[in-house]
Amino acid sequence: MSPLLRSLAVYVFLLIILRFSGKRSLQDTSIFDLVMTLIISETIQNALIGDDNSLTNAFLILILYLLVSRMLLILKTKNKKADKILEGLYIILVSSGKPIYENMFKERVDIDDIMEAARNKCQMHKFKEIKYAILERDGSINIIPWDKGSN
């Protein structure tokens, strides 16, 4: 298999893996995540280039990645369904003050994550103060408090 086809296959594979790893894992990168990224890149290097260590091959692979990224950006801009598949949608974690555990489990978010966002963004210290918590496409959690006097 040519280096360009191998590179494209690796790109698609990593895109799928990262897409399904969850939004929170992309938002909250840690030292562990950095180490895993380095290990993954080192592991995949041979699949990308094989025995060809030429600059030409490296440049071709880089150009391929840039072209594929650009094409995906254009596709996401022009096609809402593609955007939804590639980027996902926002997820409601708390609705009317009640946690939606199925969504929280699916996105690997717990009550502590929601409370951390509530403290940092809204200076809330009690779960009952939260009307809605929404996990955004970028992995951040937005908190919507109850109106004063309605909780």
Image (cartoon, rainbow, N blue to C red):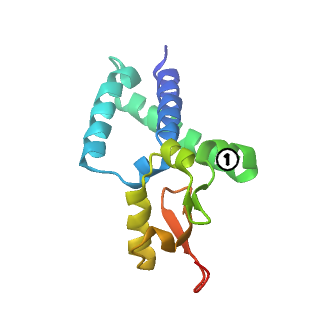
| Element under disc 1 | helix
Residue, disc 1: 84
In the rendered image, residue 67, in percent from the top left (x then y), is placed at: 57, 41
Q: Which amino acid does label 1 sit on?
A: Lys
Query: Measured along the vertical axis of the image, is residue 63 above or below residue 30?
Result: above
Give the percent coordinates (x, y) of residue 47.
38, 21
Can see residue 24?
yes
Please state the horizontal and vertical placement of residue 14, each as a whole percent of the image. Answer: 47, 33
Q: Based on the displayed image, in which of its 4 quarters is residue 123 positioned?
A: bottom left
The furthest residue to the bottom: 148
Q: Tell me which residue sits at (56%, 47%) in the image.
A: 103
- Is residue 43 or residue 138 the one in the foreground? 138
Is residue 140 or residue 150 the one in the foreground? 150
Crowding at dot 1, Cα within 10 Å, few <14 / some 14-19 / many 20+, comes out as few
Percent from the top left, x then y, of residue 7?
47, 27
- Given residues 52 and 133, the one toward you in this image is 133
Compared across the picture, whether 148 is left or right of 34 comes to right
* Vertical order, 124 against 138 (above or below): below
Q: Name the residue nearer the viewer: 105 or 91.
A: 105
Q: Is 55 left or right of 86, judged from the image as shown?
A: left
Residue 135 visible in the shown view: no
